[in-house]
Image: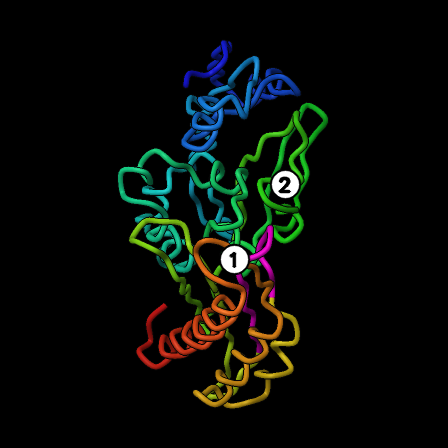
Amino acid sequence: MRPATFEYLAPKTLEEALELVGDDSRPLAGGQSLIALMNLRFATPEALVDLQGIPDLTRISDDGEFIRIGAMASQADTETNSIVLNSVPLVAECIREIGHWQIRTRGTVGGNLAHSDPASELPAVMVTLGAHYHLASKRGERKIPAVEFHQGAYDTALDPDEILTHIAVPKQKPTERSALNESVRAAGAYAIAGTTSILERNNETCLRAKLVLFATGSKPYEVQGLNSVLVGKELNSGSFSEASELVASQAPHFDDFHATAEQRKQIFRALSERVLQETWQKFQVGSS
């Protein structure tokens, strides 16, 4: 298949790009998902607005309490960036699980997030870390939490005339650790089920806990009631086992050709216990 006829536009500034995007024109980031949809005629924009010529959209910087990741920063560059590795290591850990290196050299952080695939790791990580997305249009700018941005499968809070410019990710505290664990059919494939977690502790006692599921339902799902199970308790295999039962009772389950609903329930039980164990072990070895 070939895409329908479209006009290619290559602005050099964000202001110019904002004049071009709208109902009939789509911003082009890495293009790995959009071009495939166009080839199948599932997407038929009249114009593509290529954002790769706008240098500011690729910038990664330390903005004090947050790490700023430009929406057009490639996944490969983000994965190896020292600021990201030192201050938001879960982002780098997550990106290593996206496809293969060749894919990550072309794919962008913002493109992945704006596509909002429910099986993708990166939206779930941003929800876990409490990131905010910065959007721009001719009407002005707005900031929206990751948990509100991802509204469903391939559905986001982006308006047709808006561009995702950058993501602000809170820095990991010295008292926090995070991890990701997922079940995949093969290396680089989309997850059948996935979990991300963040724990904060004082000595051996849990101060805060958050666990987000992905590749189930239509968007990242934060497990409810986890703090009541873990906060104020000693972090150990017993408390993590109790937390995994809570996850199994909440995880949206469904049948498909990968797994039955019951199999998914068991997978999420195992993954959640494992990801909490891995997060806790990072405290023991002093790693991120």
Instruction: Indicate the amino acid at tag 2.
Output: Thr
Q: Is residue 159 left or right of residue 171?
A: right
List the residue tagged with mark 1.
214
* Quarter of the image where one finds residue 174: bottom left
Say which of 203 and 213 sits in front: 213
* SS for callout 1: strand
Say which of 121 and 92 sits in front: 121
In the picture shown, does residue 259 fall above or below 98? below
- Counting from the top left corner in percent of width and height, residue 135 is at 62, 36
| Residue name at image x 65 percent, y 76 percent | 225
Q: Which quadrant is the N terminus positioned in?
A: top left
- Counting from the top left corner in percent of width and height, residue 215 is at 50, 55
Instruction: Indicate the amino acid at tag 1.
Output: Phe
* SS for callout 2: strand
- 2 or 1: mark nearer the eye: 1
Q: Which quadrant is the C terminus positioned in?
A: bottom left
In the picture shown, does residue 168 fall above or below 24? below
Q: Residues within 10 Å of mark 2 (few under 14, many from 20)?
A: some
Say which of 6 and 68 sits in front: 6
Give the alpha-carbon distance from disc 2 to disc 1, as whole Å.
16 Å
Residue ranking furthest to the right = 139
Residue 262 belongs to magenta span: no
Return the disc, 2 or 1, that comes first in the chain's sequence. Answer: 2
* Quarter of the image where one finds residue 18: top right
- Counting from the top left corner in percent of width and height, residue 40 is at 47, 24
The stretch in magenta equals 208-222
Say which of 200 and 222 sits in front: 222
Principal secondary structure, stretch drawn in magenta: strand
List the residue tagged with mark 2.
156
| Residue name at image x 50 percent, y 13 percent | 4
